[in-house]
Amino acid sequence: MSISERLESLGLTLPEPPKAVAAYIPALVSGTLCYTSGQLPFKDGKLVAEGQVGATVEPAAAYEAAQQAALNAISVAAQAAGGLERLKRVVKVVGFVQSHPDFHGQPQVINGASELLEKVFGDNGRHARSAVGTNALPLNAAVEVEIIFEVDA
């Protein structure tokens, strides 16, 4: 099953690639790897979750925000790689969670991105990962996700 078919079977639509919000490019291919810049959970031009997880944002909402950020990363990577089907596998995910000091569930929040990637890419969606808590993120986003993809040469 192709990546496009998997997205469709999951009822997911790949969003338009989000534009950069500062001085960077959203994704860059170097050799057989595509590196995405950190993607925020934008949907229809608005953040789906803002604030600290464990304070103003519930972990379940942050999990969904991580899913949206991963969809945005797939979108910018597909654009940079010259097409969705050129994305061969997910190599590494780094997820950041704007966390209340007493919140320690960063891995469960970033599972939103990881589990989505495995559903979309199958076994090629299994990846190495870091899940990091931080006191602030750009635009007050609850999560930020960056992904390294292997691409067809």
Image (cartoon, helix red, strand yellow):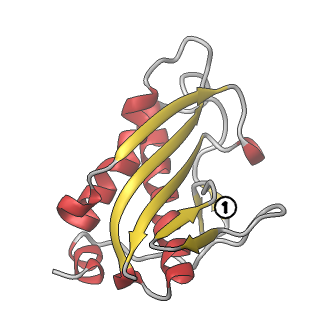
Residue drawn 38% across the image and 56% down it: 91
In the image, residue 150 sits, relative to residue 58, either above or below, namely: below
In the image, residue 137 sits, relative to residue 84, either above or below, namely: above
In the image, residue 125 sits, relative to residue 138, either above or below, namely: below
The answer to which image quadrant residue 56 occupies is: top right
Question: Mark 1 Cα within 10 Å, few/some/many (few <14, many 20+)?
Answer: few
Mark 1: which secondary structure? strand
The answer to which image quadrant residue 108 occupies is: top left
Q: Amino acid at mark 1?
A: Lys
Residue 114: percent from left, percent from top: 34, 48
Outermost front residue: 31
Residue drawn 27% across the image and 66% down it: 120
Q: Quadrant of the C terminus?
A: bottom left
Q: Which residue is mark 1?
A: 46
Residue drawn 54% across the image and 53% down it: 146
Residue 61: percent from left, percent from top: 47, 41
Residue drawn 46% across the image and 69% down it: 74
